[in-house]
Amino acid sequence: MANATDLRSVEARIKLLLNAQLKAILRDQHLAVSGVKSELQIRLLAHLNKLAAAGDVARIDHIRSLVNGSADANAPSSSLYTPTPPSSSSPYRPTSSTQQSPPAGYSMPPNPSFGSGQVHFKTSPFFTIVQPLSGVVECKARESTRDHVDVSVTLSAEVATQLQNDELYRVMVYCAHDTGLNHFSASEIAFPHQVELKVNLDDVKANLRGLKNKPGSTRPADITSFIRKKAGYNNQVTLTYALTQKKFFLVVNLVRKTPVEVLVEKLKAGRLISKEQVLREMRTKAQDPDIVATSTIMSLKCPLSTLRIDVPCRSVSCKHNQCFDASSYLQLQEQGPTWTCPVCNKTATFETLLIDQYVDDILRSTSRNIEQVTIEPEGQWSKTAVPDTPGPSNGSASTAEDEDDFLEIQDTHVSSMKQESAPVTATPPNPFATSARTPPLSSREQSVVSSAHRATKRPASTVIDLTLSDDDDDEAPRSKMPRPSLRGGGGPSMSPWNGEVHFQLPRPAPSTSAYDPNYFPSPLR
């Protein structure tokens, strides 16, 4: 029967294995490989206990060798665990360096400085990491306080010469939050939310947050201009942070920058969508009986820069013909990498970008003042006529109207002045009678025909003179509107008003001061 101490050491190492390693061992033992990591561990431990109960030492030694080999591959250094190779003749006994029971999962040592290369960052087409200039420093979680970490960067003679002679070499600060798999998978760049970065006591003004609600949109902090480019000089990088519930890992790297122009030329070199392929896809869609294909209007302007497209580009996952300019798109991604198509919002990483030769042929065949074209379902295209803005016409009708408006203002003012100088008669106006100043029908018909004299025929009652002053109080008071006379028991009289008002008093009530026997009716008999 297997030793209980040996089984416990194997069980402890099983907890250090990854999912792929656990599945490989279970597959070797002809066991199921479905489930999460905890289920795989429980299944393998149960199988190991079953073999120990059956006394199958050979299979236990075989599983022990598989577990030890996988665990040694995951160890960060050879000095952490030094297992003795197992043998069939003697049971496996750990050496003195393995007497301490290993933890349930790999954790970072208490020293905040780790060996370089343990944290891997996602690749970027704009920056290529040449070598690390410092070790990986752990920023511990601080939920209610603030803390800081110091990183020492000392340049070698070769690195200092590269920084002085080539501007494409940059010194950048990389940071990533703890996900538990930072040592085995690529990490996105992320700084603490409340953070300050200083290099040699100088504040680094850089965007360390990225775009809101866009993970992975943070770029590394460029500190090249703050570094003393001298061999052997000790540059101090200080990161101050606060109010974070996660751990972060910080490292300073020497990177080589790739300009946007170089990336555009790389796209032109080989990543193309041929014109024949685009036409074939359009004809296939047009022949689909479930889709009613109609002509569409395609803009020749980039949706990002609103300028004419120079290098038409789109992602391989995009289903539309509308393209965007490759240079404008890459410049935007260099500032804040979101890698989404500006037309359909699908993922459009640099590896999936392609040059559309169909749209490029349209751009070469049209002048630069053409802003859009009409695309037919079969792939034919034509220039879209942009409607001109209608300007003022030079016809005689509009000229006559303009002159008529000008004459109307002048004639109205003169007419009002003449009417104000006329004497006011004492006869009150009659609102129910027809005004004697209304022009006859023949005169009105003539004004319709001749527009030049139309303004002089307007009634004076509708004119308001704005040249008069408010201090002119000698104007004749306006007569009040006529009121119908009151008559007893009847309605209002509709006869014309002659300026006089008549009132009729009601009949007086019978007096009750004296007794009048004739006033009351006689009683019924």
Image: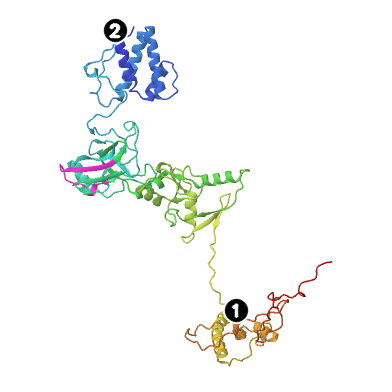
> Is 39 drawn above or below residue 466 in the view shown?
above
Along the polypeptide, which appears first: circle 1 or circle 2? 2
In the visual, does 22 lie left or right of 171?
A: right
Q: Is residue 188 visible?
A: yes
The verdict on residue 116 being magenta is no
State the residue lying farthest toward the right.
525
Going by the numbered disc 1, the residue's amino acid type is: Ala
Q: Are marks 1 and 2 in contact (CB under 8 Å)?
A: no
According to the picture, the residue beneath numbered tag 2 turns out to be: 89
Of residues 130 and 63, which is closer to you in this image?
63
Quarter of the figure that contains the C terminus: bottom right
According to the picture, the residue beneath numbered tag 1 turns out to be: 397
Q: Which residues are magenta?
A: 222-242
The number of callouts visible is 2
Q: Secondary structure at mark 2?
A: loop
- Image-quadrant location for residue 170: top left
Nearer to us of marks 1 and 2 is 1
Residue 494: image location, x then y, percent: 71, 80
Quarter of the figure that contains the N terminus: top left
- Image-quadrant location for residue 397: bottom right
> Is 487 drawn above or below residue 358 in the view shown?
below
How was this image coloured? rainbow
Q: Residue at x 29, y 7 (%)?
A: 89
The verdict on residue 232 being magenta is yes
> Is 462 drawn above or below residue 342 in the view shown?
below
Q: Secondary structure at mark 1?
A: helix
Q: Residues within 10 Å of mark 1 (few under 14, many from 20)?
A: few
